Amino acid sequence: MSHSRNLGGALLAMALGCTTSGQFKGEMAPSSPASATELVSAPHEHVRFAWTSNDGGQSGDMKVVLPSGETFAGTFHQFTRTTTATNIGGFHGSWYGGPWGYGYGWGGAWPYYDDLDTFIVYYTGRVLAVLESPAGLDMRCRFELVDGRAGMSEGGEGECQIEDGRDIRAWFGPSDAAASS
């Protein structure tokens, strides 16, 4: 029941041109623990995420605050079957540009795609974000949504990578994800 209420709210926000926003949390991933015991006993450093959107959570602005107070800001886009190069502008280049270029060691769960069409097909149903800190460090994030039709407002989970090698795990539910104005 709450699923249809949240989906309806997201669609209504898009139709009325309302701003949808949300906050969620994450944790810094421990860097290369030597054992499972070290992984479990590692301190949990909390990361704060905030986003705003004028199209029901399909795209918008995102801000991330690390435990150190370091901030990152940028944009996010949800990739759908109707996403085109025009919809996302230079997003593909930002996703792979700079420190993320070919040869960075991407593969497996973060595959590299040379052409934009394959990139869009692979990431359909996901939200991607590209952010930058005031100091010029790049961050990229990807999120799997609970319900792609509802955009960010229904929640999901994902991960972020910072160009200096730090990783973040994130998760958010409908209660965290959205408020409309």
Image: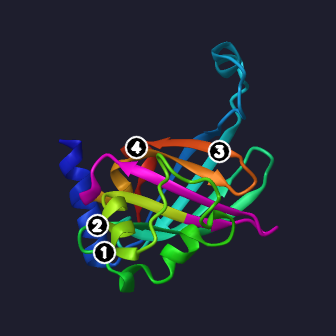
Q: How is the image coloured?
A: rainbow
Of helix, strand and loop, which one carries label 4?
Answer: helix
Q: Earlier in the sequence, mark 3 or mark 1?
A: 1
Do labels 2 and 1 touch, CB within 8 Å? Answer: yes
**What amino acid is at disc 2?**
Thr
Element type at mark 3: strand
| Front position in the image: 115 or 73 | 115
Q: Position of residue 91 (x, y in %)?
A: 50, 75
Label 2 secondary element: loop
How many numbered callouts?
Answer: 4
* Dots 2, 3 in contact, CB < 8 A: no
Q: Which residue is mark 3?
A: 167
- Identify the image quadrant of residue 137: bottom right
Closer to the eye: label 4 or 1? 1
Give yes or no for residue 77 being in the magenta stretch. Answer: no
Q: Quadrant of the C terminus?
A: bottom left
Q: Name the element at disc 1.
A: loop
